[in-house]
Amino acid sequence: MAGGDADGINKFEQRHGKTRVRVGRVWKRSDGTHSFVEWSVSVSLLSDCLPAYFHGDNSDIVATDTMKNTVYVKAKECSEQISMEDFAIVLGKHFTTFYQQVTAAIIKIVEKPWERVVIAGQPHKHGFKLGSEKHTAEVVVKKSGALRVTSGIEGLALLKTTKSGFEGFVRDKYTILPETRERMLATEVTASWMYSFESLSSVPSKPLYFSERYLDVKNVLVDTFFGPPKEGVYSPSVQRTLYEMAEAVLGRFPDVLSIQLKMPNIHFLPVNLSNKENVIVKFEDDVYLPTDEPHGTIEASLSRIRIVAGNVCSGSSLA
Ligand SMILES: O=c1[nH]c(=O)c2[nH]c(=O)[nH]c2[nH]1
């Protein structure tokens, strides 16, 4: 963040921007196939505009309204379909080069999951329906051309009805949870992964590179959670499964430096009903009470360790 010292005692940091600029963009191909994206774009600029704070002098302020307009101008200028990461880079590059006082731009985008519909086995040329999980991106561009690109997923709800257990955990006078090798496992994955591209010039020029990577990473996460279709894979805990998912992504994609995963343990409680005389419903891994809360929260991040001049570093060098 841009800093300033008003009187030698206080530290002052500031940034300003526009959040949730909503834009829909259609691209029309000559064969009549349309592509469509809906993005919610947030722009935050680090800029030297301290006189605005200290003296009420706005002469260095880039208006947040101008930032909003820029999102639409740049969307219009993208004549070919573009990934949201590349669009964020376009915006970041613009703000840090067009305005002398802007030292860095942080662009966040959340995509609404519109998916092409398939009618009678055929992808529809211009029809879309809303899916579930959301693709997210955060790009930081500095005036120097230094870059950090982070992509993510929100709301990826996954459930398997067996091949999950939880045993061997701490038992003390507060513990009532039985050990089990047979339970439901349900979660809603939030993931974010950072790419290794550290400058504007190192970003792959292949169109839609990041869109493809997003789908690939999502598939690796999902495949690792479930295991092979017939036999699945046993999960001894959410923690172990989370780690396997993170490891699979780093193992598969050399351009991913680190990944953070949040996987709530969403509980499905066994239903047992009885009155004084009879057992009415006996739980046999069949009837459950679905719950939202409380739920377990399991989260972790896994980063590649790099050795730079004898020092251990992880992740990106961009603060
Ligand atoms: O996979 C799990 N991890 C836990 O940490 C935990 N705690 C708990 O009560 N159930 C589970 N399950």
Image: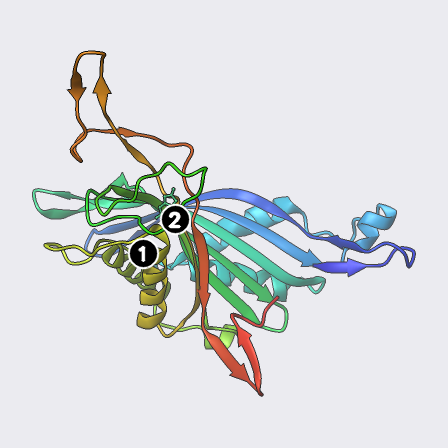
Residue type at tag 1: Thr
**Residue lying farthest to the left in this orientation:** 120
User: Tag 2, which secondary structure?
Assistant: loop
The residue shown at (24%, 48%) is: 164
Q: Tell me if residue 197 can be seen.
A: yes
Within 10 Å of the Cα at label 1, are there few (<14), some (14-19), or many (20+) other Cα atoms?
many
Q: Quadrant of the N terminus?
A: bottom right
Pointer 1 with pointer 2, Cβ within 8 A: yes
Q: Is mark 1 within 8 Å of ligand 1?
A: yes
Q: Mark 2 highlights which residue?
A: 263
Q: Where in the figure is residue 307, as x and y percent of width and height?
A: 52, 83
Residue 85 placement, left or right of 290:
right
Q: Earlier in the sequence, mark 1 or mark 2?
A: 1
Residue 61 placement, left or right of 166:
right
Q: Where in the figure is residue 88, as x and y percent of width and height?
A: 49, 58
The residue shown at (57%, 65%) is: 141
Residue type at tag 2: Met
Within 10 Å of the Cα at label 2, are there few (<14), some (14-19), or many (20+) other Cα atoms?
many
